[in-house]
Image: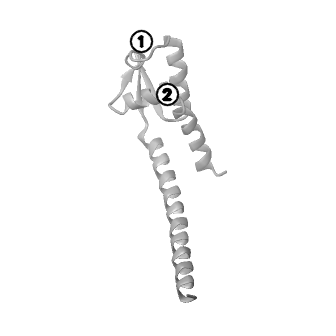
């Protein structure tokens, strides 16, 4: 596994939880405090902080503290890594489907010639 894939492993792990995914969706609208991120979730603040730690360790979010308020924001560069990985997968799948299509056309032509 290359370094690119290893980084994705952490990102996918961080996004694999519904609560963390909803936090990422909220942060896609702009930065938010821990309190703002915790509001829609039905969990204790320590649990929210654990989820935010996973997102931060995955590199998906960045945080900064101003006084007593910790604010989180998305790191869009990390999410671009997922996009490029998906594009690579799509290209590989399309090549496979193209080969399958060519094979089926050739097989059909060979069966038509033999009739």
Whole-number angstrom distance, CA of label 2 to CA of label 1 = 27 Å
Residue 30 as seen in the image, left or right of residue 41: left
Residue in the picture at 40% in, 30% down:
73
Q: Position of residue 10 (x, y in %)?
A: 58, 37
Q: Position of residue 68 (x, y in %)?
A: 41, 12
Q: Residues within 10 Å of mark 2 (few under 14, many from 20)?
A: few
Residue in the picture at 36% in, 33% down:
28
Observer-nearest of 112 and 10: 112
Closest to the camera, between mark 2 and mark 1, is: 2
- Tags 2 and 1 in contact by the CB under 8 Å rule? no
Q: Is residue 68 above or below residue 31?
A: above
Q: Position of residue 58 (x, y in %)?
A: 55, 34
Q: Is residue 82 above or below residue 88?
A: above
Badge 2 element = helix
Mark identifier at residue 18: 2
Q: Is residue 39 above or below residue 8?
A: above
Q: Which circle's residue, 2 or 1, is located before the other in the chain?
A: 2
Q: Which residue is mark 1?
A: 68
Observer-nearest of 54 and 114: 114
Q: Is residue 34 above or below residue 91?
A: above
């Amino acid at each position: 596994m290359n370094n690119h894939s290893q980084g994705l492993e952490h990102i996918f792990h961080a996004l694999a939880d519904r609560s963390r995914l909803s936090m990422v969706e909220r942060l896609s609208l702009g930065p938010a405090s821990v309190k703002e991120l915790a509001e829609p979730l039905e969990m204790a603040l320590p649990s929210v902080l654990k989820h935010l730690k996973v997102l931060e360790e995955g590199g998906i979010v960045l945080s900064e503290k101003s006084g007593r308020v910790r604010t989180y924001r998305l790191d869009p560069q990390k999410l671009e890594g997922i996009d490029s990985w998906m594009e690579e997968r799509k290209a590989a799948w399309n090549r496979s489907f193209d080969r399958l299509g060519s094979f089926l056309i050739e097989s059909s032509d060979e069966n038509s010639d033999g009739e």
